[in-house]
């Protein structure tokens, strides 16, 4: 079994943080030890240089036996013409401990002196004006080595201990920090298709984890809403498809059960009408499904004469007895888009008006503030103010008076979708006083940006 890089964020963060702290402490420890040795060595050198200067100042008056240097920690020699003329007691009778320097002063470290195995720091000073007189003063490095060794051993113990404490602390802190993330993961994993109302817990505060939880809940809300809309869409589509199929089946079963009284021509006409309605409904459902699948932009951006589209659509709408379409206020306007889709949207508005009008449908097209404004009015039953926005939802019927005569509640939703994908809007506004013969009526206003 091979050991690789750990899989958990907690372990990775702990390892990286521990290695970083270890590296910093090791570098800092090395620098501290080096600095301590440098400071102590400098202090020793300054003391030796001061003592050598004192002996040099005595000149020929220096005593043969130099005292005041301690027992074995220090030594001193005065050498004239290569001969020792004065020395401390611990090097009495010995030859010069080091060779005379070529420069005025030299400081060296020697591993040992003839009388001692310890390491020494030796300062050699040539007396000014007397090139043959040299003063050697030495001090042991044992105290410095002991001090540095003690510091090094302390660091060798404390650094691993600190690293272990930091690793445990980081492990605990990262685990505590990631607890909300794990709770979010567990809750998301537990959310199933049957219960989409559950949401992830949001920790207090406004840190990254809290914002992640709120974003996750917003996403779950959108998923839940999309699922509800899909279920509602399927239920409504099934209902709308079932009704005409049921009517067609009933008529055919009645004709088969009573062939002697069956009116086949009437049945054929009725089934044909139901088939046309089913075809229209299927096309509407396909268009809505494509919109839900992400087809959010019109396929074409051609120049479209809106007035030509209005007149062509008006000729294609089935006529109703006693209802006329007034196109006298239609002026010219050009927009960019898909002529077929725009005809579908305008046709849905005009068919809705024709279906509910009592006597007249008035269509107006004008230009205002860089937009083409198309108004479609009818003198049929009005729409309550509370339902003027809801009427554009799918499969919505606001009341019996307004929905009598057909329609499955997709035409206005499709019209708004097409117009919005062309950068425009469709709204239902109050009917201006006197614009229709009756007291009610509806007025749909479609706006599109003019072609540039």
Image: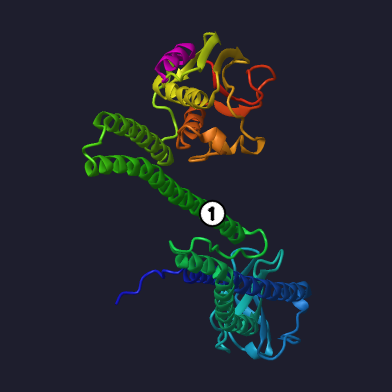
Kindly tell me whether residue 9 is visible in this rendering: no
Query: Element under label 1?
Result: helix
Residue 233 percent location from the top left of the image = 44, 46
From this view, report whether residue 49 is shown above or below residue 449: below
Quadrant containing the N terminus in the rendered view: bottom left
Q: So how many labels did they put on this image?
A: 1
Query: Residue 61, located in which quarter of the rendered image?
Result: bottom right
Disc 1 target residue: 221
Residue 133 percent location from the top left of the image = 67, 71
Q: Is residue 71 magenta?
A: no
Q: Nearer the viewer, residue 253 or 194?
A: 253
Residue in the image at 42% along x and 39% along y = 294
Q: Nearer the viewer, residue 60 or 447?
A: 447
Query: Residue 211, located in which quarter of the rendered image?
Result: bottom right
Kindly tell me whether residue 348 is visible in this rendering: yes
Please state the extent of the stretch shown in magenta in the rendering.
304-318
Q: Main secondary structure of the magenta part?
A: helix
Residue in the image at 53% along x and 64% along y = 198
Q: Residues within 10 Å of mark 1 (few under 14, many from 20)?
A: some
Q: Nearer the viewer, residue 339 or 49?
A: 339
Question: Seen in the image, is 353 located left or right of residue 74?
Answer: left
Residue in the image at 29% along x and 43% along y = 249
Query: Residue 282, located in which quarter of the rendered image?
Result: top left
According to the image, what is the colour scheme of the structure? Answer: rainbow
Residue 183 percent location from the top left of the image = 53, 69
Residue 17 percent location from the top left of the image = 54, 68
Residue in the image at 71% along x and 65% along y = 128
| Residue extending farthest front | 260
From this view, report whether residue 385 is shown above or below residue 341: below
């Amino acid at each position: 079994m091979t050991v690789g890089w750990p899989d958990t964020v907690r372990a990775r963060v702990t390892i990286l943080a521990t290695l970083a702290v270890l590296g910093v402490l090791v570098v800092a420890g090395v620098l501290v030890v080096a600095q301590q040795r440098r400071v102590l060595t400098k202090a020793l050198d300054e003391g030796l240089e001061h003592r050598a200067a004192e002996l040099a100042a005595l000149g020929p008056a220096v005593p043969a036996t130099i005292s005041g240097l301690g027992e074995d920690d220090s030594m001193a020699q005065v050498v004239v013409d290569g001969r020792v003329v004065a020395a401390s007691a611990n090097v009495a009778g010995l030859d010069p401990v080091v060779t005379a320097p070529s420069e005025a002063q030299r400081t060296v470290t020697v591993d040992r002196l003839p009388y001692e195995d310890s390491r020494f720091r030796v300062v050699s000073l040539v007396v000014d004006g007397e090139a043959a007189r040299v003063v050697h003063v030495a001090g042991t490095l044992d105290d410095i080595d002991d001090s540095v060794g003690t510091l090094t051993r302390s660091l060798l113990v404390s650094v691993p201990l600190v690293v272990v404490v930091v690793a445990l602390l980081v492990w605990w802190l990262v685990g505590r920090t990631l607890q909300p993330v794990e709770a979010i993961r567990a809750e998301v994993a537990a959310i199933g298709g049957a219960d989409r109302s559950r949401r992830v817990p949001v920790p207090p505060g406004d840190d990254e984890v809290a914002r992640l939880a709120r974003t996750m809940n917003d996403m779950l809300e959108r998923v839940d809403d999309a699922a509800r809309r899909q279920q509602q869409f399927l239920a409504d589509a099934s209902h709308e498809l079932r009704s005409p199929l049921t009517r067609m089946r009933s008529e055919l079963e009645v004709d088969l059960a009573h062939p002697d009284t069956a009116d086949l021509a009437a049945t054929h006409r009725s089934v044909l009408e139901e088939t046309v309605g089913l075809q229209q409904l299927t096309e509407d459902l396909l268009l809505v499904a494509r919109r839900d699948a992400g087809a959010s932009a019109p396929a074409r951006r051609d120049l479209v004469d809106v007035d030509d589209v209005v007149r062509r659509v008006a000729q294609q709408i089935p006529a109703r007895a006693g209802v006329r379409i007034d196109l006298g206020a239609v002026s010219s306007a050009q927009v960019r888009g898909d002529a077929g889709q725009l005809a579908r949207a305008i046709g849905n508005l005009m068919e809705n008006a024709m279906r509910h009008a009592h006597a007249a449908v008035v269509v107006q097209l004008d230009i205002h503030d860089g937009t083409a404004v198309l108004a479609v009015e009818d003198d049929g039953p009005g729409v309550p103010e509370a339902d003027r926005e809801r009427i554009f939802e799918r499969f919505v019927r606001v009341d019996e008076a307004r929905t009598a005569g057909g329609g499955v509640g997709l035409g206005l939703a499709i019209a708004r979708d097409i117009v919005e994908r062309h950068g425009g809007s469709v709204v239902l506004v109050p009917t201006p006083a006197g614009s229709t013969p009756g007291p009610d009526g509806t007025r749909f206003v479609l706006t599109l940006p003019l072609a540039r």
